[in-house]
Amino acid sequence: MIESAQYLLHQKPQINLLLQNATLSLSRKIIFSLLSLMYFELTTQQHIQNQKFPPYYNFSTYFQQGSQIEKFKCLINYFNQCVEQTEYFNLPDVNFQRVQIIDIPKWSDSTNQLSNFKFEKKRNEDHINCGIVDFSDRFFGGKVAAGRGCAQEEVLLLINPEAIIATLFTSQLGDKESIIISGILQFNEYKGYEDSFICIPTKFVNKGQVLIAIDAIYFSTKPQGYQYTQEAIYRELNKSFSGFKGSQQQIISTGKWGCGIYGGDKQLKTLIQWLAFSQACPNGTIIFNGLDDQAFNDLGKRLELCKKRYQTVGNLLKAILNLSQKNILDKLC
């Protein structure tokens, strides 16, 4: 770790910022070195005019008590695995891509057929060889390198630590932007969530997963009913479309994106993701994971009725905009 940190400090390789529609390809050695710098608290926050960067950029809080200790274990296992399995450094580069949609779909006029879907009692990351949706913060990484905090995005990055370094060169996401990360390896398993999170160290494995980071609107701080407005619906459509289209994945695993503490309506957010995926990948399959939330898993039956009744993205969206309200599926089908 020390040698890796020294390598970057002395060699000073040029690592560009991940700006609009840019792609960075980084070797495993560079990634290992960057995470080493974060570990030794040798990284600083970027300061670029008209750009805002994540406020958390090193692991200074990982030595505190509570769930941070479990975060610390995830990181240490990454370092141990890389040192013990020297073939790691010969593996292909990891690609970090920032996608901004320029040509916004004419949503209400879309004749794309509604895509296939599945509802499963799993976690997003349980699926292999597909896109995995990261319920991202507007500052990529959320609190993965911060004080207490271990929600979906933090968990996803802790089991795939190579993705954490994007917090160093990724500024705040815009409304039509997403982050796509391909080539990463999974180093840890886990159980629990937030304060109950427990790291289960494993040997690294390539699951063929592509991370799709999309940040939802934080409706908990918005006026009541705002999420049912045309403005909010179109924003969430464009955001998720950016990630789904940019990932180029025909199978995408997601779930209750933007719900929970974000205050999103489960039915509406499911419909929005389905519409965006159907526009991006009409011949693909989107998987909604609800674990033991039976009410959420039962939405599949309602979506089947919607598919038969509305058939296309445009038809379903127009119906949603006309009805926008809580329990919208009760009105749609």
Image (spheres, rainbow, N blue to C red):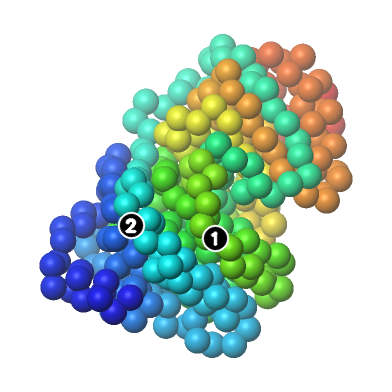
What residue sits 38% from the left and 56% below the top?
Answer: 88
**Secondary-structure class at tag 1:** strand
User: In the rendered image, which quarter is residue 277 located in?
Assistant: top right
Q: Mark 2: few, some, or many residues within 10 Å (few <14, many ≥20)?
A: some
Q: Which mark is residue 33?
A: none
Tell me: residue 331, above or below residue 293.
above
Horizontally, residue 144 falls left or right of residue 65, namely: left
**Residue at mark 2:** 89
Task: Please tell me which residue is depicted at 48% across the width and 20% down the height of the picture.
Answer: 106
Q: Position of residue 212 (x, y in %)?
A: 49, 44
How far separated are the C-alphas under marks 1 and 2? 15 Å
* Residue 104 x/y as whole percent: 42, 27
Q: Residue at label 1?
A: 203
Can residue 264 be spotted in the picture? no
Which residue lies at the image location 46% right of the left edge and 62% below the top edge?
161
Kind of residue at disc 1: Lys
Instruction: Tell me the element at label 2.
Output: helix
Residue in front for this viewpoint, 39 or 317: 39
Residue under the image location 58 percent in, 18 percent down = 283
Above or below, 44 relative to 88: below
Which amino acid, mark 2?
Phe
Left or right: residue 52 compared with residue 281: left
Does label 1 or label 2 sit earlier along the sequence? 2
Residue 208 is left or right of residue 325, and the answer is left
